[in-house]
Each structure stands twice: as C-alpha cells, then as structure tokens.
Amino acid sequence: MSSTLAKDDVQAIDQLREVYTRLTKELGKIIVGQEQVIEQLIICLFARGHALLMGVPGLAKTLLISRLAETMSLSFSRIQFTPDLMPMDITGTDILQELPGGKRAFEFARGPVFANIVLADEINRAPAKTQAAMLEAMQEHRVTVAGRTYNLDAPFFVLATQNPIEQEGTYPLPEAQLDRFMFMIGVDYPSRAEEIAIARSTTGMSLPKLDHVLHGEEVIAFQDLVRRVPVPDHLYEFAVDLARKTRPGSNESPAWLKPLVSWGAGPRAAQCLILGAKTRAALQGSYAVRMEDIAAVADPVLRHRVMTTFTAESEGVTSRELTKRLVEELSKAA
C-alpha cells in the first residue's frame, strides 16, 4: 500500500470531513449530547462494519438511527426481536399469488432486512436460529430463502441493541457471534444539563426534519476511500500487539492480565482496529492514521472481545479498564 494518498483522495478526505461536520450538525438538531456515540456509529458505517449498542431503554437509540438514515437518504427498517420471531420474519418468505388467467405462483416478499440501515432492537430476545439468520445477512450481505439467494443492497449497516438490565427470557449472543460486530457502543445517561435540554426540546412542537447530507452512492464511495488511507508500519504492529496482549494464554500478555481475562481478542480485532482508525482519521481530515486514532477506537473494538474472569468481576474490573491499561502501557513502550 502506498504511504501517501493520491491528489484526488486528499480532496475527497477534505470533502468527507465537511460531510461529517454537516452530519453531526444535522443530528444535533434532534439528539442532545451523545457526540461519542454518533462518532462511533458513523465510523462503523463508513468502515462497512456493524455495531452493537448497549444502553438502557429511553436513550433515543432508535431515534438516532432513523434520523441518521434520513440525513443520508438511506432506507431504514426496525426489527423488534421477540422470543417468537422466526427467521422468515426477518428475511422474508414466498407468498402464493394469483396471476391473470387463474394461475398461481410463488412470489418472494422481502423482509425488513432489505434496507440500508437495519435496527435489530433487543437482538438477545430472539432464539438462536433467528439470531443466526440476522448474523448471516450481516456477514454475507445476502439471504437464502427456499434455496434461492437474494443480495442485499449496499450500503448495508446493522445496528443491534441489547438491554443490559433485563435479562429474563433472553438468549445472550455467544462470543463467536459478538465478534461479528465491529464495535460495541455504550450509550450512557445524559448529563443534568443535557437532560434538561431533552425535556425542553421534546415536549414542545414536533421535531424538525433534517436535511439530506449525502446519498447512498456517495456513502459507498467514501467507504472505498477510507480503505485507501495509509497506515504507518509501526501502527499495524501496534494494533496486532494490542490484540495479542489481551490473550491470557499468550507469552506476550502481561502477568497482571492473566488472572483477569478468560478469553482474549482474535485476529478480527486487529482488522477492526485498523479499519476503525482509518475511518476516524479520514473523518477528522487526516491523510494518514495516527496513534490517537487507534487509541480512540480500542474501547469499542475490544470491550466485547475481551472476556473477564470471575476474579475480575468480583473485583469490579471491566474489560474497558483492562483495554485502557493495555493501550497506555503499549503507547509508552512504542
């Protein structure tokens, strides 16, 4: 890969930075605060990744995603996952239709997964077979129904949510399926000032309509652009070393980590660190990846890929704290 960008790509990155500024400004008309959540969602979208949102109900997750789709002129669908949801409820199914002349034929009726941005609300409420159908669509960008394959239109971005406080009657995603999500994004409560602004802005007149900032073809072009952002060799090494140090069975992991982690991040983590850093750099208007770009995406990339032990849980140590410490130690040694 070239260590510098072509002139056209430099101009395109300048354009992407302007688009990102306009996107955040438009979303700011509706969403109060949550700047980091918005940044991480947009990083995932332009990196062709999928995101898993963790947050209690009522934090405007659905509103944010639907309005993000509105600013990009993309189709949006919301799937409420329930214990009785079947795979065909997501992918679609064949329906018997009556044709002119009295003949009948099966016609495929597309399910809600056929959209550019799909919100899979409370994905852990559906059984494993339905989760697998959703994850197959995420991975392959196509669905198979009755032996026939249907491609999903690009861009295709899935945002799944999990409710962290209500676990009764849920089917938690296994680690292998969690690994399919590029980011796990935490949505926290707003500050007092933000909550006052929310109460004021949402109890008056109807919410404003947002301007269209870009179209689907432009999203795809920017997705191609961010993959051309150059990465210095030492940052490839940094990303790989960071992922490898999370593995307790490795000789490369620090001694303090071994009793706290039961399972570390796989090779996909390093790929997501690099792609996330490339996208963040481009959104910031940088023409190459910097150390701070990898550090900024380390938390959402690793928090669901580093499984803590009972010892860590009993001591109140989270995977986020472990990731932060690893990044700090590795940055000092670099």
Image (cartoon, helix red, strand yellow):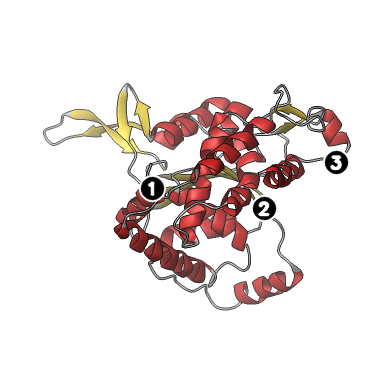
Q: Amino acid at mark 2?
A: Pro
Identify which residue is drawn at 62% across, 62% down. 34
Nearer the observer, 134 or 8: 8
Badge number at residue 228? 1
Kind of element beneath mark 1 = loop
Q: Earlier in the sequence, mark 2 or mark 1?
A: 2
Nearer the observer, 285 or 108: 285
Task: Report x, y in % for residue 176.
Answer: 58, 27
Identify which residue is drawn at 43% across, 44% down. 48
Q: Amino acid at mark 1?
A: Arg
Identify which residue is drawn at 88% across, 38% down. 315
Q: List the residue tagged with mark 2.
A: 57
User: Callout 1 environment at 10 Å: few (<14), some (14 to 19), or many (20+)?
Assistant: many
Q: List the residue tagged with mark 3.
A: 316
Task: Report x, y in % for residue 218.
Answer: 32, 57
Task: Report x, y in % for residue 23.
Answer: 46, 66
Inter-mark Cα distance, 1 to 3: 41 Å
Quarter of the image with the N terminus in it? top left
Q: Earlier in the sequence, mark 1 or mark 3?
A: 1
